């Protein structure tokens, strides 16, 4: 069955194709008005938060509607893509956004932060991500990237009373601006060599003009990789990550670790597969090394951390390495693996940060892994959920993390990158060295004091976040088939299906 | 395929359902004994009835090739394809009847025997689980499915031997059984690997079809395969050298001894040889090893049984000895004779064990009533029980006459057929005459020690104690009823396979022909002249009579003293009582060196120093140190970050530009 076809060559067609983004943008305007109207106290803030939740859910409905109807383009994808990959990635971003809002509802009040703009920024960042995942043109992707980044810079420093948050925001902004410059320069060079910023057209040009080893194109691709490498926190462009994750409010950290990183990866693999697949000789090796170094460094440094928040920050760098492995395979199987893993990773990261948020105060910077000692005695269900998250992050069989990792490994082996697969497995073994101590502390050590865990509480919406993420991780760990099929369908024909007649 | 055969999955699944239900009850409501009995016995009755239907279907259709019922693909991996499939043919039909029938009777007996035990629900859960695994074992259509059952019954055996695990010695007996069986299972596994390597399949039908073309007669490969298989059999069926666990297994409740350690599980090895008869027929050396080990075990265990005082130990060694006969049968190529003895033995040995259970039950209650702590299993504390327990005495005598080989009782026919077939093989190879002689001597000893057991237990004066005597009671009907059923079987099971000289002869032999015909080409014609046959029957009768009368005349129950006052044995008697010191020899030769190696070399050096120290802790330390070094770059200064960033850009550019 072929779904509705939209002609992207005329403005009306593009407007229809951008319906989900337009809906969310419209909601942003509504939220802006609401914030201007009510911004005095916690009550107002919750009201805005619920509005944001409604906004994200309605957008999700629109995306899913597009997805189910299998909306596609007539001819070339101009500016914006209309494929399963876009819908799947948008669903993941919206899911990440919904989980972050739900976490924030109780968190902001507890931390005595009254900043209703918070939710507006979260929505704007989500719009940016959707453009990143759905852009069929480097300029659209860059616009999305900037929209997302600027919003997240502000979110990182939204707690104006925290000096760490201010420091985090400033560092993030400085380094981010630096990286964006590389990104934009890369676009310029690619445009210079191919004459286009449209991904499919770049593909055609590279093939027909024989630009596979063109110097200008190569440098452009390298610059793009630097820009993306920064966004996804690949070593050695990762230095901002621990400081920013550490300083930002925990729900923002969760949002950054999950959705922001996911957006970076989705855009990266789209650019590489849809636009630069013919020049894969240029980028495969570079991505290969980025993946290997990121996995090793991220996991090793995480081993040395004693604070949970910093540990999770480094662990997210390690996971960026796993995802880069999927990218390095350069195949649609790799793209499918990436989609599945990003989905699972969103669930487990948000879940882990949700429990961190429940257990600490004041940004949770000071929560040690040992502070979880005896949690299983006092809060058995919370400890169980945390166990699920840790095991899933570790890639333990029975959890979605295992299936995702296995899928990445099979993509890597399929692309003759067995060495990278071995590095991934080795890095995973190292990661056991810091995930398992959390479980050990919860189950095998006595509580530090009588009063320990007295204040640990997941209230309201956060409880749903923890419960739903843990349940989904277990569900997709034992019944992954359907989700795997969806990921595979979404990634099918990401590489353009155009006949190119080479004439030299 | 007859419709009733399609129901065979229900035969298997019902005991599993019983296990689940009783297992849940044992955790949630262990005091609900009526529900436990209803479930535990109910599933077995249903299972038995359906099994009758299945076997009836096989009987009417008389298929030439087995029915294979494939349920789902279990392990597809490259060239290896293993289905979860059951195979119904004449051989599994025999086992189906024996297993469900005897299990049902013993489950009913257990209701009375275990009635007062606090672990009642747990007991029935284990027992149901055992039946499930045993049925998987006999119905499996390929080696791996059979192996699942094989391991499963081993597990249940372990759980039930150590059922009263509060007692350390009992728990140890369970462990001993488990470890001994593991040695055998190793052989089974090796055999499976080799078969897959040679044939490329593990399904029975395919392997037996391919075997004649794949293996040369008497070749090394097939000899090694069958010897490895027989190692598995020796473990499971308690043959030399792996038999020592079975007497210790008597630590379990007596119905368990009857079911698992006499009638069903321990005969799995015989079943395996019969099932793979094609393979064994191609390997004459292995077959001779099977027969020789069987004969040696039959005699060796019989000598030990002569001097045991524990009534269950006598029966345990008797079981080992009778299993030896069965292996002798399948070893000489008389597969039907081996299966025949397996069937008759299931009846009379189960009866003997349940009867001894009934005796122990009575003594236990008597001592319990007077609060004395005496050994309720020691025959020196029994004597003259026939006055208090006439029914049990009668049934036990029926079983004794059957096992001793008195004419017209079932054991007479089945044992005689094995000996006769061994004798026939002697025509081509003189060594079989030796095996036959050994078998005859063992038969004499069997008659002797069984009569001894009966004399000391039920005849002569009572030695239980003045006060206890009045408390000795016959068991309730729920226990004597099953005895009656088994006694009927012990008498009439011989009709299944009468000798050639009698009318209606060899029914089981013909029944099993579709299964064993593949091996017939490799074996000499096992036919006996009628003169020889009469001569052998006469000899068997004389031997049985000599054993029984000898014991009756030589032994003086009146001179026995209760266990507490009995004198210490000396000389050969002591050697026999201590079981030829085999346990001590094994301890000295195997257990102690292994323990020493495990303790000094493997644990304290290999594990603690090398694995834990160098590998585990060493690698962890290195990784942590590297992580610490890496974290030193995280200074917090944007300048440092930018520096590394630019370095990264340069390296990346180097990678991209070529």
Image: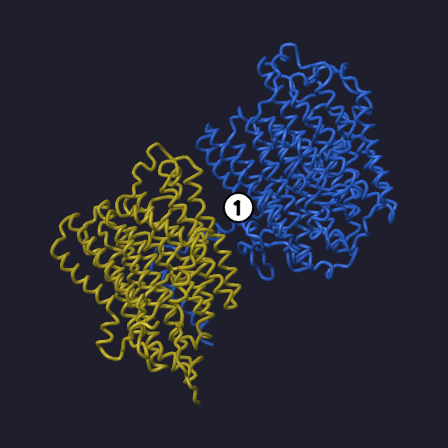
Q: Residue furthest front?
A: B503
Query: Residue A373 or A379: which is nearer the viewer?
Result: A379
Q: Is residue A216 left or right of residue B482?
A: left
Above or below for A70 versus B501: below
Question: Residue B488 falls in which quadrant of the image?
Answer: top right
Q: Position of residue B371 (x, y in %)?
A: 58, 14
The answer to whether one can see residue B393 in this image is: yes
* Residue farthest toward the left in the current orientation of the protein: A37
- Residue A419: percent from left, percent from top: 53, 63
Q: Where residue B223 sits in the image (x, y, percent)? A: 76, 52
The chain letter corresponding to yellow is A
* The furthest residue to the bottom: A504
Q: Quadrant of the N terminus of chain B?
A: bottom right
Residue B242 visible in this rendered orientation of the protein: no
> How many numbered discs sit on the rendered protein?
1
A234 horizontally vs B259: left or right: left
Mark 1 packing: few (<14 Cα in 10 Å), some, or many (20+)?
some
- Residue situated in front as seen by the camera: A360 or B594: B594
Identify the element where label 1 is drawn. Answer: helix
Colour of chain B, in one word, is blue
Q: Which residue is mark 1?
A: B10
Q: Quadrant of residue A83?
A: bottom left
- Here the colouring is by chain
The image shows residue B89 at horizontal and vertical percentages of 64, 50
Q: What residue lies at 76% left-to-right and 35% top-to-bottom?
A: B412
Q: Quadrant of residue B325?
A: top right
Chain identifier of the residue bearing label 1 in the image:
B
């Amino acid at each position: 069955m072929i779904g509705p076809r939209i002609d992207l060559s005329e403005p009306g067609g593009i407007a229809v194709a951008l319906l989900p983004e337009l809906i969310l943008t419209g909601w942003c305007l509504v939220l802006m008005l609401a914030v201007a109207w009510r911004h005095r106290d916690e009550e107002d803030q919750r009201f805005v938060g619920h509005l944001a939740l409604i906004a994200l859910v309605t957008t999700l409905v629109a995306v899913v509607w597009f997805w189910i109807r299998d909306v596609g383009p007539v001819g070339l994808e101009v500016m914006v893509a209309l494929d399963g990959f876009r819908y799947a990635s948008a669903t993941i971003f919206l899911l990440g956004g919904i989980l972050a809002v739900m976490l924030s509802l109780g968190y902001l009040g507890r931390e005595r932060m009254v900043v209703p703009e918070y939710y507006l920024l979260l929505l704007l960042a989500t719009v940016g991500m959707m453009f990143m995942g759905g852009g069929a043109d480097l300029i659209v992707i860059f616009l999305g990237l900037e929209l997302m980044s600027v919003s997240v810079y502000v979110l990182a420093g939204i707690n104006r009373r925290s000096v760490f948050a201010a420091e985090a925001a400033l560092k993030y902004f400085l380094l981010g601006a630096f990286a964006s410059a590389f990104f934009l320069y890369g676009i310029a060079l690619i445009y210079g060599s191919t004459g286009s910023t449209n991904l499919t057209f770049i593909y055609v040009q590279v093939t027909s003009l024989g630009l596979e080893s063109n110097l200008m194109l190569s440098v452009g691709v390298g610059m793009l990789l630097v820009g993306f490498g920064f966004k996804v926190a690949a070593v050695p462009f990762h230095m901002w990550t621990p400081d920013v994750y550490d300083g930002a409010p925990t729900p923002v950290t969760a949002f950054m670790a999950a959705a922001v990183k996911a957006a970076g990866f989705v855009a990266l693999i789209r650019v590489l597969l849809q636009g630069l697949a013919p020049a894969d000789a240029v980028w495969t090796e570079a991505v290969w090394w980025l993946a290997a170094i990121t996995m090793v460094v991220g996991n090793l440094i995480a081993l040395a951390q004693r604070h949970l928040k910093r540990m999770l920050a480094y662990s997210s760098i390690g996971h960026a390495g796993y995802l880069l492995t999927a990218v390095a395979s350069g195949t649609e199987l790799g793209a499918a693996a990436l989609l599945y893993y990003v989905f699972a990773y969103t669930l487990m990261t948000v879940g882990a940060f949700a429990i961190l948020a429940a257990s600490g105060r004041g940004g949770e910077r000071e929560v040690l892994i040992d502070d979880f000692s005896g949690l299983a005695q006092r809060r058995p269900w919370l400890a169980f959920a945390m166990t699920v998250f840790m095991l899933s992050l570790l890639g333990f069989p029975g959890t979605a993390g295992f299936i995702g990792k296995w899928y990445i490994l099979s993509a890597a082996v399929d692309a003759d990158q067995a060495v990278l697969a071995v590095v991934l497995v080795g890095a995973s073994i190292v990661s056991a060295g810091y995930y398992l101590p959390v479980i050990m502390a919860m189950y095998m050590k006595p509580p530090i004091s009588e009063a320990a865990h007295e204040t640990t509480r997941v209230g309201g919406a956060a409880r749903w976040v923890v419960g739903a993420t843990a349940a989904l991780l277990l569900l997709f760990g034992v019944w992954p088939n359907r989700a795997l099929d969806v990921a595979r369908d979404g990634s099918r024909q990401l590489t353009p299906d155009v006949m190119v007649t080479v004439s030299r | 395929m007859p419709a009733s055969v399609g129901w065979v999955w229900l035969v298997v699944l019902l005991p599993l359902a019983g296990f689940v239900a009783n297992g849940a009850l044992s955790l949630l409501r262990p005091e609900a004994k009526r529900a436990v009995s209803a479930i535990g016995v109910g599933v077995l009755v249903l299972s038995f009835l359906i099994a009758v239907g299945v076997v009836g279907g096989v009987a009417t259709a008389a298929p030439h090739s087995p029915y294979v019922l494939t349920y789902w693909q279990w392990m597809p991996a490259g060239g290896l394809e293993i289905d979860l499939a059951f195979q119904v043919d004449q051989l599994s039909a025999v086992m189906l009847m024996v297993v469900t029938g005897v299990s049902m009777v013993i489950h009913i007996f257990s209701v009375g025997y275990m009635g007062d035990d606090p672990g009642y629900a747990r007991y029935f859960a284990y027992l149901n689980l055992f039946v499930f695994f045993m049925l998987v074992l006999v119905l499996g259509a390929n080696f791996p499915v059979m192996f699942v059952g094989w391991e499963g019954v081993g597990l249940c055996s372990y759980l039930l031997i150590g059922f009263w695990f509060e007692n350390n010695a009992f728990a140890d007996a369970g462990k001993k059984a488990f470890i001994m069986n593991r040695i055998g299972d190793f052989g089974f596994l090796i055999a499976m690997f080799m078969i897959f390597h040679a044939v490329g399949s593990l399904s029975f039908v395919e392997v037996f079809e391919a075997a004649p073309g794949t293996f040369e007669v008497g070749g090394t490969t097939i000899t090694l395969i069958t010897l490895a298989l027989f190692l598995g059999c020796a473990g499971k069926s308690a043959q030399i050298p792996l038999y020592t666990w079975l007497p210790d297994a008597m630590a379990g409740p007596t119905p368990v001894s009857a079911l698992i350690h006499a009638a069903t599980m321990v005969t799995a090895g015989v079943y395996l040889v019969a099932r793979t008869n094609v393979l064994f027929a191609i390997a004459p050396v292995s077959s001779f090893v099977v027969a020789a080990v069987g004969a040696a075990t039959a005699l060796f265990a019989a000598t030990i049984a002569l001097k045991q005082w524990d009534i269950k130990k006598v029966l345990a060694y008797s079981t080992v000895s009778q299993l030896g006969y069965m292996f002798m049968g399948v070893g000489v190529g008389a597969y039907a004779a081996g299966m025949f003895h397996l069937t008759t033995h299931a009846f009379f040995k189960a009866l003997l064990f349940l009867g001894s259970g009934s005796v122990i039950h009575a003594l236990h209650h008597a001592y319990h009533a007077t609060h004395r702590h005496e050994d309720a299993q020691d025959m020196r504390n029994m004597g003259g029980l026939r006055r208090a327990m006439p029914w049990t005495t009668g049934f036990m005598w029926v079983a004794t006459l059957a096992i001793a080989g008195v004419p017209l009782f079932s054991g007479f026919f089945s044992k005689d057929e094995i000996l006769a077939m061994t004798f026939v093989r002697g025509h081509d190879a003189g060594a079989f005459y030796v095996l036959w002689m050994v078998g005859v001597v063992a038969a004499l000893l069997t008659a002797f020690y069984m009569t001894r057991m009966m004399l000391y237990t039920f005849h002569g004066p009572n030695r239980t104690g003045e006060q206890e005597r009045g408390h000795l009671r016959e068991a309730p009907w729920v226990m004597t009823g099953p005895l009656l059923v088994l006694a009927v079987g012990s008498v009439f099971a011989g009709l299944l396979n009468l000798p050639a000289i009698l009318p209606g002869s060899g029914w089981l032999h013909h029944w099993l022909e579709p299964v064993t015909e593949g091996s017939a080409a490799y074996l000499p014609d096992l036919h006996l002249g009628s003169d020889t046959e009469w001569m052998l029957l006469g000899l068997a009768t004389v031997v049985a009579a000599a054993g029984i009368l000898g014991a009756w005349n030589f032994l003086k129950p009146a001179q026995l003293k209760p266990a507490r006052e009995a004198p210490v044995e000396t000389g050969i008697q002591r050697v026999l009582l201590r079981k030829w010191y085999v346990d001590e020899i094994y301890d000295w030769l195997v257990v102690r060196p292994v323990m020493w190696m495990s303790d000094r070399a493997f644990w304290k050096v290999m594990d603690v120093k090398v694995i834990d120290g160098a590998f585990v802790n060493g690698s962890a330390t290195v990784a942590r140190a590297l992580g610490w070094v890496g974290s030193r770059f995280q200074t917090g200064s944007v300048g440092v970050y930018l520096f590394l960033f630019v370095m990264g850009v340069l390296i990346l550019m180097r990678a991209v530009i070529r």
